[in-house]
Amino acid sequence: MNALDDVIESFSRLPGVGKKSAARIAHYLLRSDRSLCERIARDISVLHDRIHPCRVCGAYTEDDLCPVCADPGRDQRIICVVEQPQDVQTIEAVREYNGLFHVLGGVIAPLEGIGPDQLRLSELVVRVRTGGVGEVILATNPTIEGDTTALYIQRILKDMEVTVTRLASGLPVGGDLEYADRLTLARSFRGRSSF
Amino acid sequence: MNALDDVIESFSRLPGVGKKSAARIAHYLLRSDRSLCERIARDISVLHDRIHPCRVCGAYTEDDLCPVCADPGRDQRIICVVEQPQDVQTIEAVREYNGLFHVLGGVIAPLEGIGPDQLRLSELVVRVRTGGVGEVILATNPTIEGDTTALYIQRILKDMEVTVTRLASGLPVGGDLEYADRLTLARSFRGRSSF
């Protein structure tokens, strides 16, 4: 194992990077100016020191509050509940939603030993109970775990004065019936809307 | 721009890593133990200090000679000429070849301003002239530039007492005639062999 193999090994541990991609990246780094390596190394090494969860919503931020929670222009009456911090960035990129977020930090997954207690659920209940929240949008993924978690949250919030909604699930826009999987197609029937 | 965006920006500069993959990697690093970040940062930062071209063949190594050149068990009479250092690793992984290598460091590409002088060609001539070399295998890529470079080297070595060969080019094993491109199919006709 030399230093080149070390870098290949390191990169191939990252999600979506196989052994061949890792080798390609490592050789690219060697061909590039060393300042690129220095920059990447510095960026990675300060990551954990600088970034932490937002005190309110749990999204990643460098400050006490994340940019969304700190923005008085956001609609404080709506909370969108997501699984992971990166889901906040995904939704923000669409520029469709102007409310607040709440990051669960995962989903209920009994097989992986993740129960409701490991998620940021009590924090959500406190936020709703504090008042001023009219709607909670459940934006967990349309998977078994995501659906289960959404159902669980819906039950928790049932007796509180808040509307609980779930993101629409069905055929992707631009998709083709022929290539839709059975579950998606079935769900698009159940969720059909009138013209 | 916060530290998370910096990491995403850094990673998205790497080959084969788009913005979405970079975001996925950055969030993975944040979720993982910080020792992973420390390890990757260290591996990347020492890369340029530790790795340099082999004195003889130009492949990447930590030592004066690369493992292939330093191995007395390799067939010293054959030199396989490749474009880039990573090509050595690709060929080594197949375990089909037991000779030596010579890395050109690129191909002749007039449009990019790369002429024969920028390649490690004089080093190759010196190695062949020094004697003991019976065959030079040209293993540049089967592209216009790779073919041009192979032809150029063949002409340089023409008057020297050495057999010059080129890697076979044609239909990939397990491939399908239907999906072969015209150039590959044409070349597989020209290079056909008798049963």
Image (cartoon, coloured by chain):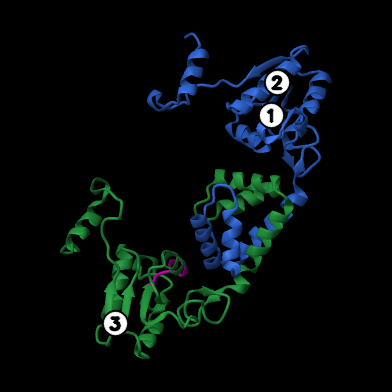
Chain colours: A blue, B green
Does the CB distance between marks 2 and 1 fall below 8 Å? yes
Q: Where B153 falls versus B43 (above or below)?
A: below
Q: Where B121 falls versus B31 (above or below)?
A: below
User: Which residue is the site of mark 3?
Assistant: B156
- Report helix, strand or loop for mark 3: helix
Residue B29's disc is: none
Q: CA distance from mark 2 to mark 3?
A: 75 Å
Quadrant placement of the N terminus of chain A: bottom right
Is disc 1 in the same subunit as disc 3?
no
Q: CA distance from mark 2 to mark 1?
A: 9 Å
User: Which residue is the site of mark 1?
Assistant: A108
Q: Could you say where residue B116 lies in the image, as x and y percent from the top left?
A: 36, 76
- Indicate left or right for A5 with B89 as reference: right
Q: Is residue A109 among the parts visible in the rendering?
A: no
The residue located at (52%, 73%) in the rendering is B60
Check disc 1: other Cα within 10 Å, few if <14, some if 14-19, many if 20+. Answer: many
Q: Which residues are magenta?
A: B82-87
Q: Is residue B99 among the parts visible in the rendering?
A: yes
Q: CA distance from mark 1 to mark 3?
A: 68 Å
Q: Could you say where residue A97 lies in the image, as x and y percent from the top left?
A: 63, 26
Q: Quadrant of residue B112?
A: bottom left
The residue located at (74%, 28%) in the rendering is A116
Residue B77 forms part of the magenta stretch: no
Give the mark nearest the N terminus, 2 or 1.
1
Q: Residue furthest bottom?
A: B130
